[in-house]
Amino acid sequence: MIQIIQDTKEDFEWAVKLNRINLEMVGLWPKLEQNSEKKLTCTLRVFVICIGFSLIIPAIHSLIRIHTDIMLAIDNLHYTLPLISSLMRLMVFWWKKKALVTIVNMIAEDWLKSKSLYERTVMIKWAQRTRICVICAFSIMGIAYGSIVSTTIFGKSMRLTSNITDPGRPMLLQTYYIYDVTKRPQYEFTLILQIVSVFIVILPYTGIDTFLGLLVFHICGQLDILKSRLVHLHQYENFSDILKDSVRCHIRLLRAVAIVEDAYNIILLILLLYFGILFAFQGFLLVSLFDEEKISIIRLSTLLVGIANIFIHMCLYCAIGEVLMTRYDAIHYAVYNNEWYFLDSKKMKDLIIFMIKSGVPVYFTAGKIFPMTIAMFCSLLKTSAGYISFLLTTRN
């Protein structure tokens, strides 16, 4: 006898809590119900996020001034590219946020409805994986952020400095302001503004990535449940009813993937271009650092953390796409390997359409062009490595 679990809202809250807290801080959590006070709060958050321009414009101004020096220019892009990428992804996500409300509601329905003990166990397993990804991603970002802030406060610099853009007192990023930042209280005000702005940028930078993990891992959990149902389909007395429910569930999940793909394909394209460029630049800086007579441990640590950060974020996207593709393939093989030869001819015919539809590959793309798979990730690494060699030749 199958044990039926009547779940409360606690399971759903546990599954989405970490993602929701992060995205709600910048007004990005997808939801329809917003009273006037919450709308005002979101409007204020828009203003707060605009503080990011207090970093981007001065950083670009600094880049213009030092563009003739390849080492300083690349060191500038080491911070400027993530800032621009984060702002672009934030705007795209905000634009697509309403469409994602449907997926969040679907997740809530799946957690709140009655289910068997096996189904609940599968959903908890995938939700736990999401939480691990969130904790790891924010831990890495926290280490990078804490390192940059602490060294700057104690008067040390984790980047290349020059007389062109650096006033003499350490700043968080390589920036150039139209006012004198060496005087008090301008210096303290600018430094605090940079610290706060970088923290604000980190939230959507990491939160949008981990939110995709939440959506996809939930869909993968539902696919595992559907697969188990299809494997034992021939054992059910009410075969037709179970098959109808399975078809509805499959169509529902296909629509969910289509919505996520539409919301994230531009974000994935931005991330793909950003990763390819930044990984090449950071690799170039890392190799150049070992050519120096005295290696700076602080700069070496900064580069290693930065490379690990973008590597993990990009690998996360590709791994998520690979996992989704694998789970959908498992649905096709579950139908194919079902003991349909024990069924009567009418029931066999009913399975054919399902088998054909489940055989169509499902995967995410970057800009509807590049499939987000581990193979594509490896190809991107090879391309970036080629550009590192080109930059080293240019420097010499």
Image (cartoon, rainbow, N blue to C red):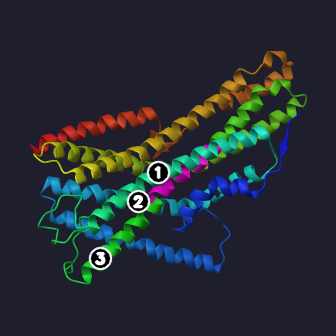
**Magenta: predominant secondary structure element?**
helix
Category of crowding for the residue at label 3, using alpha-carbon neighbours closer than 10 angstroms: few (below 14), some (14–19), many (at least 20): some
Let me know if residue 218 is in the magenta part: yes
Vertical placement of 342 versus 207: above or below? above
Tell me the residue at 58%/57% (across/down): 18
Vertical placement of 247 versus 173: above or below? above
Tell me the residue at 40%/37% (across/down): 377
Q: Tell me how far mark 1 sits from mark 2, CA to CA.
A: 15 Å
- Return the residue found at the far front: 154
Q: Tell me how far mark 1 sits from mark 3, CA to CA.
A: 28 Å
Which residue is the site of mark 1?
137
Residue 20 image position (x, y, % from top left) = 59, 61
Which residue is the site of mark 2?
86
Which residue is the site of mark 3?
190
Instruction: Return the residue nearer the eye: 72 or 14.
Output: 14
Residue type at numbered disc 2: Ser
Tell me the residue at 71%/20% (across/down): 337
Labels 1, 2: front one = 1
Residue 179 image position (x, y, % from top left) = 21, 81
Q: Which residues are magenta?
A: 205-219
Instruction: Return the residue nearer the eye: 45 or 138.
Output: 138
